[in-house]
């Protein structure tokens, strides 16, 4: 049978572990939100990059046409 002292010690450890678990869950939620944010930002930047590349190609073609050296 477990005595009072062991019970109290075990209960204290349990409460400490539960608090730590809750903090880790909160940290995990924050990390997931940050990961989602950065993933959306990366997708947005990738889309902007493709748009800029397309604009550059169009500008290059227009410049060649203007110079009269288009293929």
Image (tube, rainbow, N blue to C red):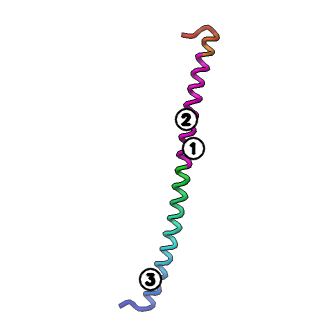
Q: Quadrant of the C terminus?
A: top right
Mark linked to residue 41? 1
Left or right: where 1 falls relative to 25: left
| Quadrant of the rendered image containing residue 33 | bottom right
Contact (CB < 8 A) between labels 1 and 2? no
Over which residues does the magenta segment extend?
37-61
Q: Quadrant of the N terminus?
A: bottom left
Question: How far separated are the C-alphas under marks 2 and 3?
Answer: 55 Å
Mark linked to residue 24? none
Neighbourhood count class around disc 3 (C-alpha, 10 Å): few under 14, some 14–19, many 20 upward: few
Measured from the top left, where is residue 36 in percent x and y? 53, 50
Q: Can you identify the residue that label 2 sits on?
A: 47
Q: Secondary structure at mark 2?
A: helix
Q: Secondary structure at mark 3?
A: helix
Q: Residue at x 59, y 9 (%)?
A: 69
Q: Can you identify the residue that label 3 sits on?
A: 10
Relative to 61, does residue 11 appear above or below in the rendering?
below
| Quadrant of the rendered image containing residue 60 | top right
What is the tally of numbered marks visible in this picture? 3
Measured from the top left, where is residue 43 in percent x and y? 53, 40
Frontmost of labels 2 and 3 is 2
């Amino acid at each position: 049978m477990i005595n009072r002292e062991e019970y109290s010690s075990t209960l204290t450890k349990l409460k400490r572990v539960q608090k730590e678990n809750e903090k880790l869950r909160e940290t995990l939620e924050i990390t997931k939100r940050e990961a989602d944010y950065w993933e959306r930002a990366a997708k947005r930047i990738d889309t902007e990059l493709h748009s800029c590349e397309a604009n550059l190609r169009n500008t290059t073609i227009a410049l060649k046409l203007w110079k009269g050296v288009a293929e």
